[in-house]
Amino acid sequence: MYIVAIAWIYVALMMSVAEATNTNGTVLGGIVTFIFYGILPTSIIIYIMDAPRRKRVRLAREHAASEMAAADPKL
């Protein structure tokens, strides 16, 4: 999963460099290109793809907390 994200960030970086070094392009345009074509979509996709792992971790924490509460009635 992460290799695709790294590759896409690289492609977006090359797009932004091309934008910034073009005769009609600007550095601000390159930065905006990198953010909107690279960082933003990649972060959204990684967040969505990581949802099952976050759910497993949350359920494991809840299970451990319930076992601990059942083992120690003073809490």
Image (spheres, helix red, strand yellow):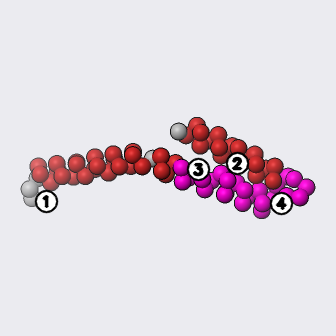
Picture quarter containing residue 25?
bottom right
Q: Is mark 3 on a helix, strand or loop?
A: helix
Label 1, on which residue?
Answer: 75
Q: Is residue 6 left or right of residue 52?
A: right
- The quadrant of the rendering that contains the C terminus is bottom left
Distance between the alpha carbons at the discs numbered 4 and 3: 23 Å
Q: Which of 28 and 69 is in front in this view?
A: 28
Disc 2 is placed on an element classified as helix
Name, please, the residue furthest toward the left: 73
- Disc 4 marks which residue? 26
CA separation, marks 2 and 3?
Answer: 10 Å
Q: Residue at x 59, y 50 (%)?
A: 42
Secondary structure type for disc 4: loop
For the residues carrying marks 1 and 2, which lies nearer the camera in this image?
A: 2
Q: Which of marks 3 and 1 is in front?
A: 3
Q: Are marks 3 and 1 in contact (CB under 8 Å)?
A: no
Say whether residue 43 is magenta. Answer: yes
Characterize the local packing of mark 1: few (<14), some (14-19) or many (20 or more) Cα atoms within 10 angstroms: few
The image position of residue 2, as x and y in percent, is: 55, 40
Marked residue nearer the N-terminal end (4 or 3): 4
Q: What residue type is labelled 3?
A: Thr
Residues at marks 1 and 2, CA–CA distance in whole angstroms: 52 Å
For marks 1 and 2, the one nearer the N-term is 2
